[in-house]
Amino acid sequence: MFFTKVAKVVAVLGLVAGGARFLTAMLVAMEISPAGAIPRYLGKGTAGEHIDRGLYVMFVCIIVGLLAEISEGVRRPRG
């Protein structure tokens, strides 16, 4: 049960972090001059790379959350 709770917390925090990274990269990509904003707000790489990484993190966290829900459902007593 401990790992199920930890997985749920990790899934929620990762989903928030991935979403924030995705939204920040989208806002920087829509700037008139993104070349100056990318190092300031995102660091190395392009805005597209950061968008991809944010989506990957969100996807993995959704999978972890689903696995945690399955784990919780298997552990519940039936009846």
Image (tube, rainbow, N blue to C red):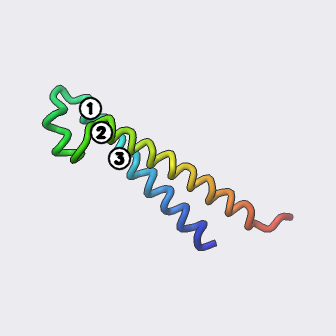
| Pick the front one: 75 or 52 | 52
- Residue 67: percent from left, percent from top: 63, 56
Residue with the most extreme front position? 45
Residue with the most extreme top position? 32
- Residue 47: percent from left, percent from top: 28, 36
Horizontally, is 4 left or right of 17 in the view?
right
The circle drawn on residue 25 is: 2
**Residue occupying image coordinates x 39% and y 39%:** 52
Going from N to C along the chain, the mark reached first, 1 or 3, is: 3
Q: Quadrant of the N terminus?
A: bottom right
* Helix, strand or loop at mark 2: helix
| Badge 3 density bin: few <14, some 14–19, many ≥20, Cα 10 Å | some
Say if mark 2 contacts mark 1, CB within 8 Å.
Answer: yes
* Helix, strand or loop at mark 3: helix
Going from N to C along the chain, the mark reached first, 2 or 3, is: 3
**74 lies above or below 54:** below
Q: Quadrant of the C terminus?
A: bottom right
Say if mark 2 contacts mark 3, CB within 8 Å.
Answer: no
Nearer the camera: disc 1 or disc 3: 1
Horizontally, is 75 left or right of 18 in the view?
right
**Residue occupying image coordinates x 16% and y 45%:** 40
The span from disc 2 to disc 1 (Cα, nearest Å) is 6 Å
Circle 3 residue = 20
Circle 1 residue = 29
| Pick the front one: 54 or 72 | 54
Disc 3 marks a residue whose amino acid type is: Ala
Disc 1 marks a residue whose amino acid type is: Ala
The span from disc 2 to disc 3 (Cα, nearest Å) is 8 Å
